[in-house]
Amino acid sequence: MQIDIGQLLAIFISAVFVYNVILSRFLGLCSFIAISKETKPALAMSLAVLFVITMSSALTWFIYRFLLIPFNLAYLRTISFILVIATFVQLVEMIIRKFAPAMYRFFGIYLPLITVNCAVLGVAVLNIDMFFINGKAVQASFFYSVFQGVCVGLGYTVAMLLMSGIRERLDLCNVPKVFKDFPLAFIIASILSLSFLGFNGFRF
Amino acid sequence: MKKLIPEFLKGLIKENPTFVLALGLCPTLAVSVTVVNGIGMGIAATFVLLGSNIMVSLIKNFIPERIRIPCFIVIIATFVTITELFMKAYSPALDRALGIYVPLIVVNCIVLGRAEAFAQKGKVLNSIFDALGMGVGFTLALILISGIREFLGSGKILGATLIKGFEPVFMIGMPSGALLVIGLLLGFFNLLKSRKEKACK
């Protein structure tokens, strides 16, 4: 198995900056707007998302490579992926509640919310689109898939932390009443997204 | 019939999924670059909504309470797969333009939200009209956003130039433009709402 360092770097920069999962691909936007009011919950959510995306990238790779391709069932990928992700999130929730109650309190309600976070399914589908060409896995595709999962999770964390920092300060400002909360959050996200557009020069 | 028409109409404005309920924003923002994409996404989502609402309200009595969400997700995913295969076969160009946002209809909160909030309680006929209303409301919202973006971002509507010599705003066609347009629209609808409340007083 040969891993190309240049390719890894390309995946990292495009997933975190150029095609940031929230600011340019709009995946996981609901949680981004809803939970970015304060930094601490935002960080908890980001870590939970990072963990689930990484694990589900690995899981869905196995499902696709060893179940769907050999049995010629590639068209079932949406159904099987969403079921695997939902079950996995439930499992993680049960394990954390049982063995790490402190962590469970930290993540709280954010873990079950991840099931319907489109970023998780989005990355799984994206991995298949990128690292399987005509139904055949490219070299070291498992490693690339998991790495892309980690990078997308990091991109999510970066966007969440930026946004929650800005919104915390914005609480103290006097803004027009009709723009309070959601409309303003979208406009801030737009400006953030515009500044991330500057990374487009790094396109690979 | 009298009861069914309000079920349909409420999705259009009063409970518009995009602007009032703020559900399913990811695909709304991502595909609203051109009106054609917006309409395609709207029709695909409406089909999935209709199918899943009908199925859920038909078999609601057989689904145990505790595992209803996974059951709903499987039903929704089935209809999404149908849509995906159909789109790949009959309009590959649209499929390429919408990309990963077609399979992502599965996690569109509008569809699961309607199954959970309406179809598992209502009768089949009511669910059909509810799904159609929500679907059309979603499509209209998509057409509004993508119309604004296509016009400002490229100076065209449905590929036809409207004003000669119009200098397109590059940024509106980019992802940041989508966020800006929806932010301003939400603010605008809030303004209308507060005006109306004041008038009522």
Image (cartoon, rainbow, N blue to C red):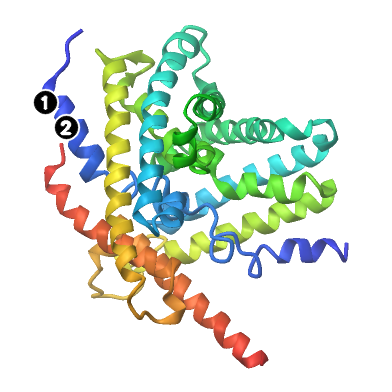
Q: Could you tell whether B82 is left or right of A172 in the image?
A: right
User: Does residue A83 lie above or below A26 as drawn?
Assistant: above
Residue lying at the far front of the rendered structure: A102
User: Does residue B97 lie above or below A102 as drawn?
Assistant: below
Q: Quadrant of residue B81?
A: top right
Q: Chain of mark 2?
A: A
User: Does residue B132 lie above or below B150 as drawn?
Assistant: above
For this rendering, which residue is in front, A148 or B82?
A: A148
Numbered tag placed on residue B51 in the rendering: none
Q: Quadrant of residue A15?
A: top left
Q: Could you tell whether A203 is left or right of A160 in the image?
A: left
User: Which residue type does callout 2 highlight?
Assistant: Ala
Which quarter of the rendered picture does the N terminus of chain B lie within?
Answer: bottom right
Numbered tag placed on residue A6 in the rendering: 1
- Picture residue at 30% right of the left edge, 36% below the top: A152
Labelled pair 1, 2 in contact (Cβ < 8 Å): yes
Query: Are discs 1 and 2 located on one and the same chain?
Result: yes
User: Which residue type does callout 1 highlight?
Assistant: Gly
Q: Residue B19 appears at what percent x and percent y? A: 54, 65
For this rendering, which residue is in front, B43 or A174?
A: A174
Gap in angstroms between the C-alphas marked 1 and 2: 6 Å
Which quarter of the rendered picture does the C terminus of chain B lie within?
Answer: bottom right
For this rendering, which residue is in front, A191 or A204?
A: A191
Q: Quadrant of residue A64?
A: top left
Residue placed under numbered mark 2 in the picture: A10
- Picture residue at 60% right of the left edge, 32% below the top: B77
